[in-house]
Amino acid sequence: MISKEQLDLAWNIATHDRLAQKYERMHGEIYNDFEQNRLKNELAAAIALIETHSEAKVVLDFGCGAGNLTRHLSNLQCEVIASDISSGFLKLVASRKYSQRVVTIQLNGVDLSNVADESVDMVATYSVLHHVPDYLAVLSEFMRVLKPGGVVYIDHEPSEAYWTGSAVYEQFKAEMNRKVPRDYKKYLVLSNYYDWLIRRFVNPRYHREGDIHVFDDDHVEWQKVVASLENLGGKILVSRSYLLYRRQYCQEIYNRYCEEVSDMHVLVMRKQYGG
Ligand SMILES: C[S@@+](CC[C@H](N)C(=O)[O-])C[C@H]1O[C@@H](n2cnc3c(N)ncnc32)[C@H](O)[C@@H]1O
């Protein structure tokens, strides 16, 4: 009998293999200058918090996808272990040139059994935890492979405010929607109708793009992430919510709301010596 976890993993692998080549084109909420600059600065600040005293900083990019973090980390002088469950993504990442050493490894989706204890200076992950069947369990794997003084960087998961909702956030979205022209191209993509049909009528929990923990009653809970990391000997250094900048956004409207509302969260933690 195949378990739900195995089904989720198989779905995730198949979906991401299929999307690998077009992933960057599809994801304007990630691949836009504003978000890429924010990410570069956050990563640089997180690297500066590493206290492992290693000469060359080795970073595990967990769920590397098309190599979004891998490229930034390499530009920031880190050696990178780009890891993913999808061989399609790993092939894409391996085919590209970087300024520092980049190796790829395939994960089993559950643990980091092919990564040695205390072997990396940083584990960085962006928009991945909601794909992992037991996302809290994988945090203990992050801590196991991290050297003391190393840093965990988790980014691009919805903030608590996103799930609780607020009148101001709704106002922000309404104003943005009025200003930004509708993207009619999505109505020409046949597979979107298939997704819509399944989500609406057949299985409301159908996970498009392999999403698992993206429901009101089952999402990545930051309080649990913080508590788990602290229990495992980590010290939280950054825990901040922010408003994601999507490619189609109007900068003026975004600037007016970005201090007041958030929909994403970033967390940086350091593994304590003797922790
Ligand atoms: C939304 S994409 C994010 C990709 C990349 N981190 C980025 O910044 O664009 C999610 C990634 O997580 C990977 N993934 C899905 N399930 C996973 C699991 N159980 N363990 C590790 N990676 C997983 C997918 O193959 C995909 O590359």
Image: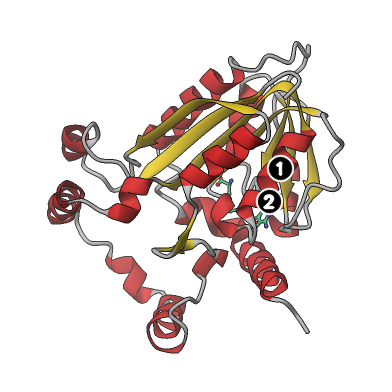
Q: How many discs appear? A: 2
Of residues 183 and 157, the one drawn nearer to the viewer in this rendering: 157
The secondary element bearing badge 1 is classed as helix
Query: What amino acid is at disc 1?
Result: Ser
Pick out the residue farthest to the bottom: 202
Residue 76 horizontal side relative to residue 201, left or right: right
Residue ID for mark 2: 137
Please provide percent x and percent y for residue 105.
Answer: 80, 46
Residue 74 horizontal side relative to residue 181, left or right: right
Please provide percent x and percent y for residue 59.
Answer: 71, 30
Of residues 4 and 104, the one drawn nearer to the viewer in this rendering: 4
Point 21% across, 35% down: residue: 260
Point 61% across, 20% down: residue: 47
Residue ID for mark 1: 140
Splitting the image into 4 quarters, where does residue 9 fall? bottom right
Is the CB atom of the residue marked by disc 2 within 8 angstroms of ligand 1's nearest atom?
A: no
Query: What amino acid is at disc 2?
Result: Ala
